[in-house]
Structures are given as C-alpha cells and as structure tokens.
Image (cartoon, rainbow, N blue to C red):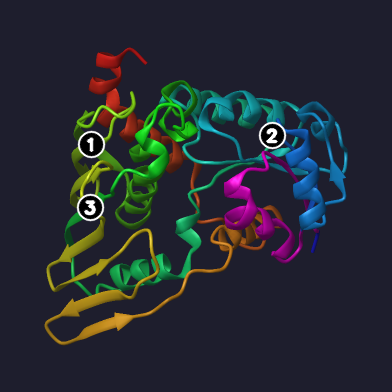
Amino acid sequence: MATIQWGMIGCGAVAEVKSGPGFYKSNNSALVAVTSADVAMTRSFAERHGVAKAYDTTAELLADPAVQAVYVATPPSSHKPLALDVAKAGKHVYVEKPMAMRFEECREIVEVCEQRGVRLFVAFYRRAMPRFLQIKQWIDAGVIGEVRTVRAVQHQRPAPEDLSRATLPWRLIPAVSGGGKFLDMGIHELDLFDFLFGAIEEVHGIASNQAGLYDVEDTVTATWRHASGVQGFGSWCYVCGNDEDYVEIVGSKGRISFEFFSDKPLKLVTDTQSVDMDIPNPAHVQQPFIQSIVDDLNGVAPCPGNVESAVRSTWVADEVLKGYRAQKGY
C-alpha cells in the first residue's frame, strides 16, 4: 500500500495537537513538508514534529513533487485561494472547516478540484471519531426507533480574549472568519446531524449580537428539517453566564443524549435499558479522519466525509446568518 505524502499550510494551534500529528501517526501516511505565514513558526513546528522540509512560502511547498496531498490549516478567509492553488498544483486537497467563507466559494472549490482531477476533503472529522460512530450505530440499528427530533445547545461564557477588541482572536473578526463561534463550532454539529440524519432541506435562523463585545454574531437560534423528516432545534450563545453543552436525539422508542464538545459518557435510554457508555476521544482528534482519507486515497475504504454535505453545511450556516450579515454588511 502506498504512503501518502502530505504537505501542510498553516502551523497554528489546530495543527499542534488536533490534526498535525495525525498525518505522521496514521498508517501509510507521512507529513513531509510544512509552511505558514510565519517563517519562525514553520521552522519550529517542523523541528518539534520531525518534518523534513520547512518551506518559507506556499509556492515552494506546492512545487515539491514529493507532496501528493495538502492540508490547509488556515483561517477561512484563505481557504478558497489556497484550496484552488493546491488543486491547480495537481495535489489532493484537505481543507479545514468551514470549507470557505460562503456557499458560492465552496462550489467554486469543488468545481476546480473536479476539473483538475484531484480529491477534496473537508475537516468535519467528528464523522470518524469513535463516540459519534457509536451514536450512528445505535441510530442505524433502530435502538431508539424512528428518530423524531434533535436538539443542540451550546452556551459559553466569553473567553478572556473576547472582552477587549484589542485581543480578539481571528475567529471573531468577520473579514477573516466570516462569522463568529457559531460558524467555528456550531457548524460541526450541523455536519454531524447531516451525517446521522441526511441532508438538511429547510432551515430558519435568527442571529444577533447581544453583548456588543465584537462585530460578529454572539447568539444564534435555528430550526431545521432533514430530508428524512427529522426536525431540529439549536441554541448557541457565547455570552452566557454559564456553560452548557448538550445534544439530545429523540426517537419513537428512546433517546440518546451527550455533550458534543467533550468526551463525557454517552447516555442511551429506552423502555428496556439505560446505558452510560464511556468512549474517550483520541489523543489527536483528527487522526481517525485523516486515516480514513489515506485509506480512501489508497482505495481501501471510502472516507465518511462527503464533499456535498460539507458544502451543504456552509449553505445551512449562510441561511442562518444571512439576515445578520446583511444588517452588518459583511
């Protein structure tokens, strides 16, 4: 079986533990080259992670004939241009989520990858994590009967850096992120629901900024309907006085509840059983998904990620945020 040789653009926080090590710890996979906008950061990452080549520019990395696939680990504002550059260089694309700033940009990335004959993957990596695969197994096996509704709640206190415009992270700067923490984290939940229940066909949302700490939305509510008939409701607020992370899937014969952003035990309740299942997260949460991409490229088994569903997730987010974006002019 061939070893897929990876390049990586971006050496920031997401690459340090969540994703980067997965490229050299997965079977038949090697991280051979890295680059970023910060030359010192690039070289530090390469030295600490044992990467042979630390390039000063993206162009140099893309010109390396040894690199077969490239992971784009940068903020959303650069996803489209970098993904297009990677595809035009004839290399497979693995881009962080959201795929791009808007639905139309996602479609352009898909089209160029198809034209260039390269594969495209998007980092909705929870589709390959064991805890979420267990949930899918319960649902597919009919353990809770026919799924009726899903409810997601993510409420958080503002982080210290959110409290001053001088220290805002890029995730809260609209020109860089395209939206707030809903777009950064809530979109993971929307993608997982697509994975579990099929495409979201109808969505209605309200976004607002209630605390005035920054320009992007800080509070979102949404309702939606999947093609399968499952109906959903979500509440995301990042300026609360308390933290809450909860998802509940209700079926005709029982329910599944869990925290989405932790690895606390899953809870399954039916008329005949009540189960608490502890499934710890992997040390590098993207590694199972990276392994699935490598296996897919080698023709072993398909990656559970789906390009069309990744595009749909951005469409859903656009629908939820369009009123707020129009109001704020971004």
Start-end of magenta stretch: 3-29
The residue identified by callout 3 is 153
User: Element at badge 2?
Assistant: loop
Nearest-to-viewer mark from 3 and 1: 1
The residue identified by callout 1 is 219
- Answer with mark 1 or mark 2, whichever residue precedes in sequence: 2
- Residue 177 shown left or right of residue 292 in the figure: left
User: Element at badge 1?
Assistant: strand
Amino acid type, callout 2: Gly
- Answer with mark 3 or mark 2, whichever residue precedes in sequence: 2
Q: Where is residue 198 in the image (x, y as percent from the top left)?
A: 32, 50
The residue identified by callout 2 is 117
Q: Which of 60 and 198 is in front in this view?
A: 60
Q: Position of residue 6 (x, y in %)?
A: 75, 48
Q: Measured along the vertical axis of the image, is residue 72 above or below residue 329?
A: below
Residue 162 falls in image quadrant: top left
Residue 247 falls in image quadrant: bottom left
Q: Where is residue 216 in the image (x, y as percent from the top left)?
A: 33, 27
Amino acid type, callout 3: Val
